[in-house]
Amino acid sequence: MDLGIKGKVALVMASSRGLGQAMAVSLAREGVKVAVTGRNAEGLQESVRLIEAAGGVALALSWDLSNHSIIDSLVSQVETTLGPIDILINNTGGPPPTPAAGQDPALWQKSFNDMVLSLIAITDRVLPGMRQRRWGRIITSTTSGAIAPIKNLAISNTLRAALLAWSKTLASEVAADGITVNIIMPGRVATDRLRQLDEARAKREGSTYEAVVEASLRQIPMGRYGDPREYGDTAAFLASQNASFITGTVMRVDGGQIQAI
């Protein structure tokens, strides 16, 4: 299927590994020019290698989401090198696992700055150009914990739920400009981050990693973890011309795990 986005330009946040990297590579397979971002130089170079192997064009940018002052200059660099940004993939790393009670307000504040305010500021920077061209895709990657809170991930659950409300509100504001705004939500997709969380759970519960995985698989109707490419390809579809009438929605990539309607 031709997704109709060959030659478009995408900015994919936090794309030096994991789901961000998978989304960047899937866009590249569709002929999209992709700017990848992150703090890990080695990971960024791997993303560039994978994008080029897929036949794409890549630009790697060292980007610390906690520093809002660099947003304008880095977005300008993408625009100068690759062209105006048509597709924005909002994605961040996750905060440390924590319960809801008793957390230092400074940790909440830092996480909000890095995971929510940064993405809002980046979106505000690229929106005027999308509106002028009357075409754009804004896709925000969150977590299933935003609608079905995950134990010991209180900060992630809370802040990513805020991104759902923001995205839904923004979608109605820009729909008439030809811009779609959607959420993509992973269940248990096999990334390094998921392995770290499973290992932390095993340690916390005095169990083994293998036992934690087995218990998790029993909760997934498909009986397996997702492949990162499946997640990336879903993001590419939401960015496509074919998905031009889909906005303000949540796309779950979870193998049927999330029980909420």
Image (spheres, rainbow, N blue to C red):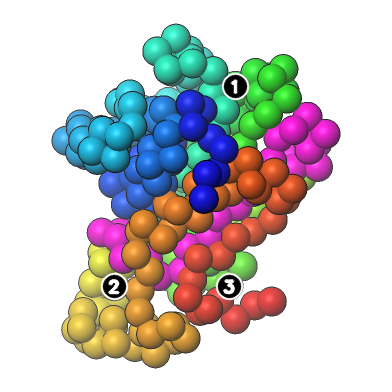
The first of marks 1 and 3 along the sequence is 1
Residue 208 in the image: above or below residue 144: below
On screen, 157 above or below 188? above
x and y percentages locating residue 252 in the rendered image: 56, 65
The residue where tag 3 is placed is 148
Q: Quadrant of the C terminus?
A: bottom right
Q: Residues within 10 Å of mark 2 (few under 14, many from 20)?
A: some
Which residue is tagged 2? 198
Q: Earlier in the sequence, mark 2 or mark 1?
A: 1
Report the Cα–Cα distance between label 2 and label 3: 18 Å
Nearer the observer: mark 2 or 1; the answer is 1
Which residues lie in the magenta part? 170-193
Under mark 2, the amino acid is: Asp
Left or right placement of residue 111 versus residue 137 in this view: left
**Which badge, 2 or 3, comes first in the chain's sequence?**
3
**Which residue: 25% across, 79% down?**
202
What is the number of the mark on residue 125? Answer: 1
Element marked by disc 2: helix
* Quarter residue 59 falls in: top left
Can residue 156 be seen? Answer: no
**Residue 200 lies in quadrant:** bottom left
Front one among 62 and 130: 130
In the picture, measured across the screen, residue 12 lies left or right of residue 117, that is left
Q: Quadrant of residue 43?
A: top left
